[in-house]
Image: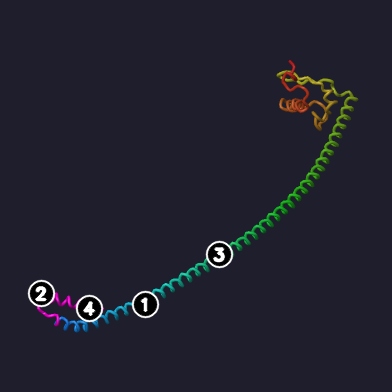
Amino acid sequence: MNRIVIVAIAAVALVTFGCGQEEKTATQVKEAAPKAAEQATPVEEKVSQAVAEVKEQAAIVAEQAESTASAAADAVVTAGQTVKNTATDVASEALEQTASMKEAAGKKLVAAKESTAAIGTEIATTTAAVVASTKEAAVQAKQEVSAAVSTLTTKAAATVESAKKTVSTAVSGGDIPEKVTLDNNYADVSFTHKVHAESFGCQTCHADAAPGPFDLGKEKAHSLCKGCHQKMAAGPTKCTGCHKK
């Protein structure tokens, strides 16, 4: 190292002083060399000191970098653990909410089933009551209809019997004419009076009045005679069927 420094100083001196200094003797150069060596020694020491400082700074930087890397690694681990814990908490909360919703849905389903069953029972009960009431009403109506029919039958039988007695009395007295002719402008109407009396009774035409002649206009005659023919599905219903010219 010393040799290199000496050579460098000699070269610098040679360039500085130029060719005009060539007459300097080797002795002078040798005399200047120790001084240059003495001057170079502090430089070497400074270089060594600088290298040591650089190494020291490098060690400090390396230590700081290692510390920073360690802190970063710890931060990553901490963050990962935090994320894991958060995910675990979220998953747990979601499971709890799902279970709660499932339980609530189950309760609602049970309540709906119970409500449906109650409605079904109520409908069945109401239907049974309506059916029973309808049956009772039907039985009662049937009884009432039967009683009414019986009453009407009795009255009808009594009316027929009374008519028969009336006809019989009239026949025995010889008061019922065989045939009756009604004068009419269109054409006279003749009918078998005795047959009608014996078949339907005097009251059918004479009502409650005593048998005998009575006023019989067009409308009343058509309603009485034609209406009866249509009802019984027997006897004429056209004009020429009764009015004979």
Q: Amino acid at mark 2?
A: Cys
Lower sequence index among marks 4 and 3? 4
Question: Which residue does the image show at 80% across and 25% down from the upper left?
Answer: 213
* Image colouring: rainbow
Q: Amino acid at mark 1?
A: Ala
In magenta stretch: residue 13:
yes
Mark 2 to mark 3 CA distance (whole Å): 91 Å
Q: Which residue is mark 2?
A: 19
Q: Which residue is mark 1?
A: 59
- Which image quadrant for residue 180? top right
Mark 4 to mark 2 CA distance (whole Å): 22 Å
Please state the total of marks drawn on the protein image.
4
Q: Residues within 10 Å of mark 2 (few under 14, many from 20)?
A: few
Mark 1 to mark 2 CA distance (whole Å): 49 Å
Question: Secondary structure beneath disc 3?
Answer: helix
**Which residues lie in the magenta part?**
1-27
Q: Which mark is residue 91?
A: 3
User: Of the residues tagged 1 and 2, which is closer to the observer?
Assistant: 2
Lower sequence index among marks 1 and 2? 2
Determine whether label 1 and label 4 are within 8 Å by CB. no
Question: Secondary structure beneath disc 2?
Answer: helix
Question: Which residue does the image show at 54% across and 66% down from the upper left?
Answer: 88
The x, y position of residue 3, in whole percent, is 23, 78
> Residue reaching furthest right?
172
Lower sequence index among marks 3 and 1? 1
* Residue nearest the viewer, comparing 163 with 234: 234
Q: Which residue is mark 4?
A: 5
